[in-house]
């Protein structure tokens, strides 16, 4: 039995093909009178016609796709946020198209343009910004072009692109972690900072070291170790610190995957984490439940962050971008036990 076409529906309803298309697929520019629309839909139901999703997307100027751009899907930080984005998108009847930059910031612009060409309804961009004016301006221009065509964007990052943004309290959370560690006896610290151009790493480094300074202490320059914002970066940074840096009581890695790499490097150097040296991170990624000893960290509600960003991405543009702050909470575990 041949499949029913839109032309069949138009003949059944006694309307033009263009009117049938607008009634079923929608249109970004023209509408159909209600009585004609009802007639077309009734004819489609009688004939068992199924609309073509691609045709609907072309007519409406957008698809039922939500774009999601992250730095590294293998990082539990991003996968936890992606789970929240996917859940919120499903509630809205949308599918998620996921793209990863592989920690190459310049890739964000190309990926956004690709999602625009695929007529994604909205896009969520996840990941800290770089102190790089050229890359930022290129992304800002790509976002503006996408919005000019009717798309909407939200970010989980620093609010520097004039779009709706979920802003994690990096500075305040790191400061609270430093204060909590000092309250249980720690005084000598090192920080695995990530790349110095990474704004999230810089905010967390500043918050932590500032809180230490407020107590009349300091984190010496030799104890600020620049490294990649990854597990292997944390391993290499800790290995360098143990080889050439000052002796410290605790090491703050500016994210949890770096902290996990730092713990591995300490073990490989013959140290017992939680006894010979303390280690703390930031994010409270779900894989920490399998880490021994338990990692002290700053907990971020990552799936809810993804849900919130999705809701912001689907909102129509307002007169000013919205910035939604996310509260965080210090969690001390066995990797930084109280000092006697």
Image (spheres, rainbow, N blue to C red):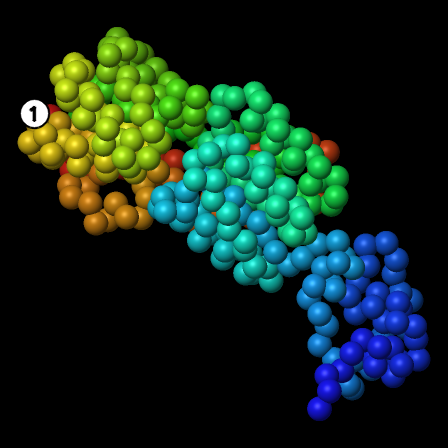
Q: Residue at x 71, y 54 (%)?
A: 62
From this view, report whether residue 211 is shown above or below residue 91.
above
Q: Residue at x 67, y 48 (%)?
A: 117
**Which residue is disc 1 drawn over?**
340
Secondary structure of the residue carrying tag 1 is loop
From this view, report whether residue 312 is shown above or below residue 131.
below
Q: Residue at x 23, y 20 (%)?
A: 190
Front residue (pair 86, 135):
135
Q: Name the image quarter holding residue 154.
A: top right
- The answer to whether residue 273 of the structure is visible from this angle is yes
Q: Is residue 201 left or right of residue 143?
A: left
Front residue (pair 196, 103):
103
| Residue 330: image location, x then y, percent | 30, 34
| Residue 163: image location, x then y, percent | 63, 35
From this view, report whether residue 169 is shown above or below residue 65.
above
From this view, report whether residue 259 is shown above or below residue 187.
below
Q: Residues within 10 Å of mark 1 (few under 14, many from 20)?
A: few
Q: Is residue 124 left or right of residue 284?
A: right
Q: Is residue 5 left or right of residue 340?
A: right
Q: Name the image quarter holding residue 244.
A: top left
Q: Quadrant of the C terminus?
A: top left
| Residue 307: image location, x then y, percent | 51, 49
Q: Quadrant of the N terminus?
A: bottom right
């Amino acid at each position: 039995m041949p499949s029913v076409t839109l032309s069949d529906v138009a003949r059944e309803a006694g309307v033009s093909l263009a009117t049938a298309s607008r009634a079923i697929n929608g249109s970004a520019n023209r509408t159909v009178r209600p009585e004609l629309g009802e007639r077309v839909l009734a004819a489609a139901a009688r004939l068992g016609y199924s609309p073509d999703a691609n045709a609907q997307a072309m007519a409406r100027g957008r698809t039922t796709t939500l774009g999601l751009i992250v730095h590294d899907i293998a990082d539990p930080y991003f996968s936890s946020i992606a789970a929240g984005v996917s859940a919120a998108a499903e509630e809205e009847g949308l599918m998620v198209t996921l793209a990863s930059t592989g920690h190459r910031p310049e890739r964000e612009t190309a990926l956004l343009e690709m999602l625009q060409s695929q007529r994604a309804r909205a896009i969520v961009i996840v990941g800290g910004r770089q102190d790089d004016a050229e890359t930022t301006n290129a992304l800002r221009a790509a976002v503006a072009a996408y919005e000019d065509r009717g798309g909407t964007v939200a970010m989980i990052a620093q609010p520097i692109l004039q779009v709706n943004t979920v802003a994690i309290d990096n500075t305040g959370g790191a400061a609270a972690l430093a204060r909590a560690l000092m309250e249980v006896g720690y005084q000598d610290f090192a920080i695995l900072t990530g790349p110095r151009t990474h704004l999230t790493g810089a905010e967390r480094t500043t918050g932590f070291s500032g809180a230490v300074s407020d107590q009349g202490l300091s984190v010496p320059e030799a104890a600020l170790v620049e490294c990649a914002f990854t597990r292997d970066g944390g391993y290499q940074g800790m290995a360098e610190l143990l080889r050439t840096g000052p002796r410290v009581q605790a090491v703050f890695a500016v994210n949890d995957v770096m902290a996990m790499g730092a713990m591995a490097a300490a073990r490989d150097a013959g140290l017992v984490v939680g006894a010979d040296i303390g280690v703390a991170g930031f994010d409270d990624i779900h894989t920490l439940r399998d880490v021994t000893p338990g990692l002290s960290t700053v907990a971020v509600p990552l799936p809810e962050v993804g849900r919130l960003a999705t809701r912001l991405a689907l909102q129509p543009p307002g007169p000013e971008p919205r910035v939604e702050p996310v509260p965080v909470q210090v969690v001390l575990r066995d990797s930084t036990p109280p000092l006697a």
